[in-house]
Image (cartoon, rainbow, N blue to C red):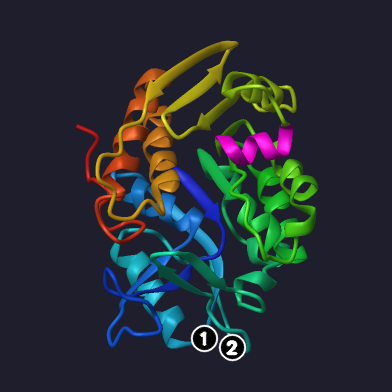
């Protein structure tokens, strides 16, 4: 079996109150799942790619739900371990922001042992984000190992987060991933925090100087890609977004899909924008992801 992409990272169960309500007053909530890497896996699976997700979840009902959801989406979960002592992470989505409850979660205790038996050399691409770099020391090392063992395209999204084990050292910890990858897919603000730079093009050049041969910078109004010293851009139009969370992961899935199929950078940028815009039309990180790029 040849994998199109294998991703490593945490997925959480998500609670979202109805529009206009909060967790304090709501009598009902929507239950979903979300994780930077697994969101991208779902998107690629819907587009017909063979993908696998590597992680840990608790031996709890939340873990059951996530595994059922990933399997239903066509994401292979054979390398997801169940942790009998630690819980599955939790995410609360409210109108004033997102709150994470992942300290001590099963995924925060991942180690390089979680990669034992994973068919990384057979994968056309691997993906890990800065979230994995920051949730725990073992997870950080596992992310480094994923990148070092891969023989295909190595993809990193910096995906900086506050309040995690490594957040105070995030520039150091996430840059380690970026220096070991081929393709960076990052938000403009995050890349500027890590690398400085006068504009998105300059940020991309600074990132490329660290080793990646292709750098994509997602801004608020446009997205740009630096590949073979050529800078290309595409406009972003989100319309009336219901929920912007997950748009970056959806963009990544669309971009990766086109590049894995041999499409051009320009085609990949436009596909990523379309996928990111589609996801914002529903209160879920993945529910509205399209099943084709046509």
Residues at circles 2 and 1 in contact by the CB criterion of under 8 Å:
yes
Which mark, by number, is residue 84?
A: 2
Whole-angstrom CA distance, mark 2 to mark 1, is 5 Å
Q: Which residue is mark 1?
A: 59
Q: Is residue 71 visible?
A: yes
Location of residue 76 (image quadrant): bottom left
Q: Which residues are magenta?
A: 188-195
Frontmost residue, 41 versus 125? 41
Q: Is residue 203 above or below residue 144?
A: above
Query: Which residue is pictured at 60% across the width and 74% down the height?
Result: 102
Q: Main secondary structure of the magenta part?
A: helix
Query: Which residue is pictured at 48% across the width and 61% down the height?
Result: 35
- Badge 1: residue crowd in 10 Å (few <14, some 14–19, many ≥20): some
Which mark, by number, is residue 179?
A: none
In the rendered image, residue 110, in percent from the top left (x then y), is placed at 67, 68
In the rendered image, residue 6, in percent from the top left (x then y), is placed at 51, 50
Q: Residue furthest left?
A: 294
Q: Is residue 30 above or below residue 223?
A: below
Query: Which residue is pictured at 62% across the width and 44% down the height?
Result: 158
Location of residue 214 (image quadrant): top right
Seen in the image, is 130 located left or right of residue 236? right
Frontmost residue, 160 versus 269? 160
Q: Quadrant of the C terminus?
A: top left
Q: Is residue 271 above or below residue 15?
A: above
Frontmost residue, 70 versus 33? 33
In the rendered image, residue 116, in percent from the top left (x then y), is placed at 66, 63
In the rendered image, residue 275, in percent from the top left (x then y), is placed at 31, 40
Location of residue 189 (image quadrant): top right
As helix, strand or loop, the secondary structure at mark 1 comes to loop
Q: How many marks?
A: 2
């Amino acid at each position: 079996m040849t994998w199109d992409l294998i991703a490593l990272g945490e997925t959480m169960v998500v609670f979202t109150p109805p529009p206009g309500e909060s967790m304090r007053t709501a009598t009902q909530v929507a239950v979903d799942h979300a994780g930077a890497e697994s969101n991208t896996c779902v998107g690629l699976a819907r587009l017909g790619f063979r993908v696998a997700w590597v992680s840990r979840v608790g031996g709890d009902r939340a873990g059951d739900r996530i595994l059922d959801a990933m399997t239903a989406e066509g994401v292979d979960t054979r390398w997801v371990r169940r942790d009998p002592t630690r819980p599955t992470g939790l995410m609360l989505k409210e109108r004033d922001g997102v709150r994470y409850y992942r300290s001590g979660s099963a995924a925060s205790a991942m180690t390089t042992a979680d990669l034992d038996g994973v068919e990384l050399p057979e994968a056309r691409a691997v993906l890990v984000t800065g979230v994995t770099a920051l949730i725990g020391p073992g997870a950080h090392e596992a992310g480094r190992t994923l990148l070092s063992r891969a023989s295909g395209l190595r993809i990193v999204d910096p995906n900086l987060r506050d309040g995690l084990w490594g957040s105070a050292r995030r520039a150091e910890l996430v840059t380690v991933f970026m220096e070991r990858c081929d393709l960076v897919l990052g938000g403009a603000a995050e890349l500027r925090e890590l690398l400085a730079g006068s504009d998105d093009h300059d940020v991309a050049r600074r990132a490329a100087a660290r080793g990646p041969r292709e750098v994509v910078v997602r801004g608020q109004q446009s997205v740009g890609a630096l590949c073979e010293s050529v800078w290309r851009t595409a406009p972003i139009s989100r319309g009336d977004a219901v929920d912007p969370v997950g748009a970056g992961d959806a963009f990544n899935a669309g971009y990766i899909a086109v590049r894995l199929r041999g499409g051009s950078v320009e085609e990949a940028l436009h596909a990523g924008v379309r996928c990111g815009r589609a996801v914002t039309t529903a209160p879920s990180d993945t529910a509205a992801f399209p099943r084709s790029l046509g």
